[in-house]
Image (cartoon, rainbow, N blue to C red):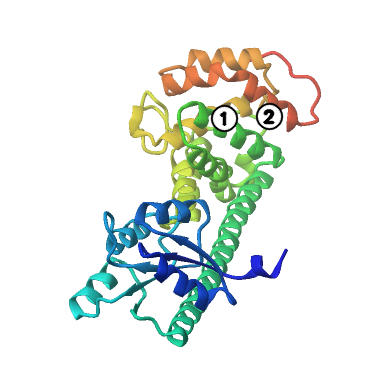
Amino acid sequence: MSDNQNKPTILVVDDVPENIDILTGILKDDYRVRAATNGPSALSLVKKMPPDLVLLDVMMPGMDGFEVCRELKADLASRKIPVIFVTAMGEVEDESRGFAVGCVDYITKPVSPPIVKHRIKTHLALYDQNRGLETQVQERTVELEQTRLQVIHRLGRASEYRDNETGLHVIRMSHYAYSIGLAAGLSREEAALLLNAAPMHDVGKIGIPDSILIKPAKLTSDEWTLMRRHCEYGAAIIGDYAHPLFQSSRSIALTHHEKWNGEGYPNGLKGDRIPLFGRIVALADVFDALTNKRPYKDAWSVEASLAWISGQRGEHFDPELTDIFLSIVPDIMKFMEKYAEDQGPMVGAHV
């Protein structure tokens, strides 16, 4: 890379070529200088090759400098580029208007080379400093998001250890939920949120005694009453925080055992009163539970599991989501095979 390519780029905008020549002569030793003789050309150049700073004439035919600056500040891609007005207009009201539309400084004509160089140097330094701070903030934000994800995933894994299962269960059902969500019309960002929140669905099992949690027989009425409380325990463990990841995790933990017909638990929610993420995770969780061995049951075949889920359309499960799930079985099977348990062949269904 040449020395010239390492230099900051200044865009000079003026409808008078002689003015452009003067500013270019002042700046060419220290900066790369590009020029435009009207507003539309300047905006086009900024889009193609964003400069580090714009020196902008105010009085231009057609689109004046105020309008050019307003357009630059309205575009997310260029709004942070510093704009300095270069003008013969020195009245207070004109300066106020310039600052109102987003300029950072004024230089009056005829220009003084030392003033031009000093103002540009100052505002480039501030611009670089702001970009550095933004980079630090972005890096810290990524770190914080990764920490939140690790907290969620570790708690999810903790619940699986309590339930005598491997972490593959939460991996499989989370990817099932992600696939269902995308097919149901969630954006990639929303589906990713679902993927990362779903592992917390059974975190409340941490509060259930082993004698109930891993009992290899049918639960008594009292045991079943206590077992159902894992949804509320999970919501309490996650807490009520504003961040979408925690909000989604809490909602899933609390509602993934609700049923479309209103006969689920803990709150007997019915139909679309059940949050969407809870309805999706209900399908993903039950399918994985059916097709894998548990302390109280052998693994069902995929065919038997799909038939049972189909039979629960409009009863246990959201009918529209059930249809979507059944339409993407090939995608579901890819994750099922990728994260399969080493538990031998599946056996036929039994009640």
Q: Quadrant of the C terminus?
A: top right
Q: Position of residue 227 (x, y in %)?
A: 52, 40
| Residue located beneath label 1 in the image | 179
| Residue located beneath label 2 in the image | 335
Q: CA distance from mark 1 to mark 2?
A: 10 Å
Identify the secondary structure beneath mark 1: helix
Name the residue at 69% across, 25% down. 334
Mark linked to residue 191? none
Identify the secondary structure beneath mark 2: helix
Answer few, some or many: residues within 10 Å of disc 1's Cα (few below 14, many 20 plus, some between 14 and 19): many
The answer to which of 80 and 31 lies nearer the viewer is 31
Image side of residue 190 versus residue 260, left or right: right
- Is 49 situated above or below 88? above
For the residues bearing labels 1 and 2, Cβ distance under 8 angstroms = yes
Name the residue at 45% across, 29% down. 185
Q: Residue furthest bottom?
A: 114
Q: Position of residue 220 (x, y in %)?
A: 54, 32
Answer few, some or many: residues within 10 Å of disc 2's Cα (few below 14, many 20 plus, some between 14 and 19): some
Q: Position of residue 70 (x, y in %)?
A: 31, 60
- Can I make out residue 326 in this image? yes
The amino acid type, in three-letter code, at marker 2 is: Phe
Quadrant for residue 304, please give it: top right
- Is 91 situated above or below 132? below
The amino acid type, in three-letter code, at marker 1 is: Ser
Q: Quadrant of the N terminus?
A: bottom right
Name the residue at 70% across, 22% down. 299
The answer to which of 296 and 82 lies nearer the viewer is 82
- Can I make out residue 316 in this image? no
Quadrant for residue 61, please give it: bottom left
Q: Residue furthest front?
A: 18
Q: Position of residue 329 (x, y in %)?
A: 61, 19
